Image (cartoon, rainbow, N blue to C red):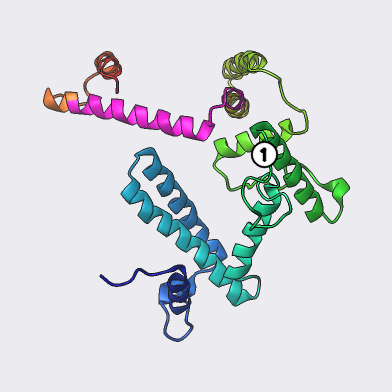
Amino acid sequence: MSDRYTLDDLLYLMQRLRDPQHGCPWDLEQDFASIVPHTLEEAYEVADAIAMQDYPQLSGELGDLLFQVVYYAQLGREAGHFDWEQVVDGITRKLVRRHPHVFPDGNLHTPAGTLAIEADQVKQRWEEIKAEERAEKAAQPQQLSLLDDVPAALPALSRAQKLQKRAASAGFDWSEAAPVVAKLSEEMDEIREAIAEGDQQAVAEEVGDFLFCAVNLARHLKVDAETALRDGNAKFERRFRYIEDQLAQAGESIEQAGLARLDQLWDEAKRAGL
């Protein structure tokens, strides 16, 4: 069996793909923006493999995601913005800085076990350091918003949770879940009012408020909203497929079955633990 390829080999492969004379025509056409959809797709495929606990598949998906980072690094090198070494150096320095409880003197090679710290202190210090970093980035700190670096391209549920968490770091938050439950009920009432008024734009706005509040409740209950909805999607899919299978076995058409029959099969799927 031949020796395994290394990260250096992957970096070399990327250079070959982007070689102006002998590279891959498709790869040569790509730029930062055109690669973004592929990066998002690969990240979701990583999440799917984890959700299915398919670890052999996860290994391959992580490779695909790593290749995306290598791709951006190559594009950055060609444009003179940055290179792979700067990417690695930057993340390493940032993580050393954000973990003073592990690297108390700011040195990556600090001997382990030289400083103990509680988990709550770690979280608090992490937020403090990130706030310091955001302030350092701002040319005019007085105009800096806490929300400035929350990526707009995040999935909506994840972004809502991150926006809320960032606001909470400044004290803009309820201290417990009960008021959030009450707010969720209030948002539902506002949806009903908008429906009664026949104002579709208001309906859409109120539904958005309801979803944002639902994410807030999930956060207070220490539930990741994006993961919870992914799990909910998977549950719906399992139960709907059960309905399709049962109807197919009975020689019935799902279009002709009727809602009562579909509800009956849905309840069967629930009782079956699907």
The structure residue drawn at horizontal position 37% and vertical position 44%, both measured from the top left corner, is 49
Can you give x and y, in whole percent of width and height, for residue 205 in the image?
62, 29
Report the front residue among 41 and 136: 136
Can you give x and y, in whole percent of width and height, for residue 272 in the image?
25, 18
Q: Is residue 236 left or right of residue 198?
A: left
Report the front residue among 271 and 244: 271
Q: Does the magenta stretch include residue 220?
A: yes
Q: Is residue 102 left or right of residue 33?
A: right
What secondary structure do most residues of the magenta stretch adopt? helix
Q: Mark 1 points at which residue?
A: 116
Q: Is residue 16 left or right of residue 207?
A: left
Can you give x and y, in whole percent of width and height, for residue 176 in the image?
67, 17
Report the front residue among 94 and 48: 94
Q: Magenta segment range?
A: 216-245
Q: In this view, does 125 lie to the left or right of 268?
A: right
Secondary structure at numbered mark 1: loop
The structure residue drawn at horizontal position 64% and vertical position 70%, both measured from the top left corner, is 82
Task: Please state, as top left, top right, bottom left or bottom right, where the N terminus lies in the image.
Answer: bottom left
Can you give x and y, in whole percent of width and height, for residue 195 in the image?
57, 18
User: Is residue 255 visible in the rendered structure shown here?
Assistant: no
Amino acid at pointer 1:
Ala
Number of other residues with Cα within 10 Å of mark 1, as a class: few under 14, some 14 to 19, many 20 or more: few
Q: Does the magenta stretch include residue 211?
A: no
The structure residue drawn at horizontal position 67% and vertical position 39%, both measured from the top left corner, is 116
Taking 233 as reference, is 17 above or below it?
Answer: below
Taking 129 as reference, is 248 above or below it?
Answer: above
User: Is residue 141 visible in the rendered structure shown here?
Assistant: yes
Task: Please state, as top left, top right, bottom left or bottom right, where the C terminus lies in the image.
Answer: top left
Rendering quarter of residue 161: top right
Taking 13 as reference, is 262 above or below it?
Answer: above
